[in-house]
Amino acid sequence: MWLVRSALRYPYLVLVLALAVVSLGSIFLTRIPSDLLPIFRTPAVQIVTFYNGMPPEVVEGDISSRMQRWTGQSVGISHQEAKSMTGVSIVKDFFREDISMESAMSQVTSYAMSDLFYLPPGTIPPMVMPFDPTASVPLCLVSVSSETMSEQELYDVAYFELRNRLQSIRGVIAPAVYGGVLRRIFAYLDREELEARQLSPMDVVRAIQEQNVFIPTGNAKLGDLDYMITTNAMVDEISELNDLLIKIEDGKPVFLRDVARAENTQSIQTNVVRINGRRQVYIPIYRQPGANTIEIVNEIRTKLTQIRQRVVDMYEGADDVLLEVVMDQSIFVRNSISALEHEGLIGAFLAGLIVLLFIGSVRSMLIILLSLPLSALAAFIGLYLSGNTINSMTLGGLALAVGLIVDQAIVTLENISRHLSMGKTPVRAAYDGASEVAGPIFVATITIMVVFFPVVLLSGISKFLFTPLAISVILAMGASYLVALTIVPLCCARFLKAKPGADSATGEHEPAFFRVIGRNYAALLERVLQRKMLVGISTLIFFLISLGLVPGIPWSSVPTKIGQELFPATDSGQFTIFVRAPSGTRIEATERLIESVENEIQDVIGQWDPRDEMATSDLQMLISNIGVLMDWPAAYTPNTGPMDTFMLVQLKENRSRSSIEYSILLRERLVDRFPGIEFAFDTGGILTAALNFGLPSPIDIQVTGSKLEVGQEIARTISDEVRQVDGAVDVRVAQRLDYPSIHIVIDRVKAAYLGITPEEIVKNIITATNSSVTFNPSFWIDKKKRNHYFIGAQYPEGEINSFATLENIPIRPRSGDSTEPVLLRNIATFERTTGPTVVNHVNITRVTNIYSNVVGRDVGSVVSDIEQR
């Protein structure tokens, strides 16, 4: 064959090519990204839009539905999903695989921006970002903690210093800050003083807006010079706000300090993070598609030292601030990849050992084993050039191919050995032996490649998982074929010697136990051939019985069949607990509940030990994320309100029980100890989250329909049925319609007679209860830190505690200084009602989701039982 002939004729060329493979493979091996799973290449785009305070149903109708219809015109879109919460709209557009991410981003961005004109006035322009549904779990969390700094200061450190600098690391997405409180400059209103001086909350807001002006004054050319104009229109110190003039009353000025007090304070807290029982702040770190997980975490750890020094220099009392990487998922990735590499090396060692035992030559063994690294490095070159990564699937493919790679080399070497035993010269024996088997090896290689090639044509999650595995096998097999017909004959010609009469490459006779095995096999084969009919019938019966174990064969009477799972369950060393209190529970009450839950968790797993000295405790870390800040964080959390919490439990590496066992123990205990509280567990970690495309459970039953109440009723009925299925646990309806609401009905006619507009009423209500920052923020710049903050007015948070507070908000016309304020209760009535916390869409259709986890059985069997009900 020409390939063998060329290898023997040009040995130095073959040597150079082999060295090139080793060099390039080694270089690419250090550059190719490492991750747990392959890169998800189906384009998806996320559009996040904010309108602070807008109810979910209004967000759904005025923002989410419009955005879905508008961006749904994009070419190649396959389906859409949407989530509408209070003040937040999240729309996800999924595209066909033949559409590039660049095209998807360009189209969606163009449509989203063009729809801005039609969105409700005051809507913040939508943010369009690439979205990877397989990367819903952060790689790690970067926590900010201190014994002396306040939550407000911790939030500032994370938001202004840490987040932006982490974004500069290649492949990092650090989108939001969780925990802490937002710094605000508030004029806390004195309701009695407002009424006494015939003022409303909006009078104070207007005074702040008009007398704390953020307008650049530009330049003025005066004489021969060009002067830069500056003014004191913006206050320098917070205390100066107290001297702002509200109005002139009977010739006497009324200052802000007469009806309010300006303070450096914080917004109303809606999100609390507890790490090992202490309030802290963290930033979740996500990766961009194709980024190297391990390199990202390593770079973050390196950069945190520099960032901490800057924080210490800029913030007073920050000497004890700690910036730490916690809940590091790269450990699981490292361990998984390391395990596969270890198994591959063991496989290579065992293959070499078997070769040595059967062939009996160290030289022959080394020649055969040489094919393994060359084929693997050639496969790595192909993986790098094709844009793949080192992950569990590509490494699994290479591990699978180890035996096949060795087979080709063994066949070639054994045939060359046979020709050597005929007395031929090593070069002639190498040529004749390799040429004889070149055709059969080629057919065998192509057969294996053809078997794996259809995997490349799969779609969806199957393509995402198994195409890289097939590619790695095909690349390794192609490389091993070339090695078997070039490197192997060349090495045999150089290093093996002719020994006529020998049975192997060593010239030694075949060992006695091989002859025994050969005689026994020949005798068995002879008996089998004498009983062809019996063997054929027995084989058919065995085949039918084994086929009956496969799910989906209806005629099978076998009671137990093989279970169905997309991926086997693994012990990730951590699990997540989703906790939901009754709708509308204040975040303070939810935190007290979570503190009790944390105590129960520590009773089961063991007390958290900061020094890691307690051998009886398996608890490494416990993080509780309570509530949600209706801003950027809302796009990256399963929480929908102050009653929701997700708890991250990380176990020690050397633990007495698995994460699955602990979740079973805690499920029973927590449900028993906290009646009326909803608990759900997720033990799969980063792997299961990727395979579930970010869903919190492997089973998701969707009820579609335009009426939320009907969908909720049907969902409850279905969930009751699912609970009866063996193995189905944590069954719950994702959406709720019982969030308490107050509907204020304005008497428009009475208000009009008083010269008061609905706009004025609504703005006064918002100012009193949520601050004017919601709709009309004023700016203040901290000159030391160079950070900007919002100025607004509101009632002191402690005074917003009853219906009377709401009813007695003073309101007066915008014009007319002498007009006496009217209390809200005189021009409006109040109705207690309920509403949804979140509204979900699939393809612009309302969806109610029923989630269920599986314990003790396989997912396929549970799903089959659910479908039968």
Image (cartoon, rainbow, N blue to C red):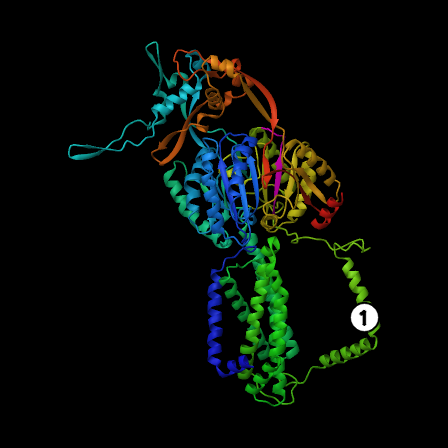
Q: Closer to the camera, 514 or 146?
A: 514
Instruction: Indicate left or right for 477 with 673 as reference.
Output: left
Instruction: Indicate left or right for 127 with 229 as reference.
Output: right
- Looking at the picture, which amino acid does disc 1 mark? Gly
Magenta region, residue range: 574-585
Residue 576 on the magenta segment: yes
Residue at image location 76% in from the left, 77% down from the top: 521
Seen in the picture, residue 222 relative to 814 is either above or below; the reply is below
Q: Where residue 636 appears, x then y in whole percent?
A: 53, 41
Is residue 625 something one can see in this rendering?
Answer: no
Q: Where residue 596 appears, x then y in whole percent?
A: 62, 34
Is residue 268 something one can see in this rendering?
Answer: yes
Specify the farthest residue to the left.
Answer: 224
SS assignment at label 1: helix
Q: Where residue 803 appears, x then y in whole percent?
A: 55, 18
Residue 288 on the magenta segment: no
Q: Where residue 848 appears, x then y in whole percent?
A: 64, 37
Quadrant occupied by the C terminus = top right
Q: Quadrant of residue 391?
A: bottom right
Seen in the picture, residue 174 relative to 120 is either above or below; the reply is below
Q: Label 1: few (<14), some or many (≥20) within 10 Å?
A: few
Q: Quadrant of residue 432?
A: bottom right
Q: Which residue is mark 1?
A: 536
Seen in the picture, residue 236 relative to 78 is either above or below; the reply is above
Quadrant occupied by the N terminus = bottom right
Report how many numbered discs are placed on residues in the image.
1
Instruction: Indicate left or right for 335 with 777 as reference.
Output: right
Residue at image location 43% in from the left, 20% down from the top: 202
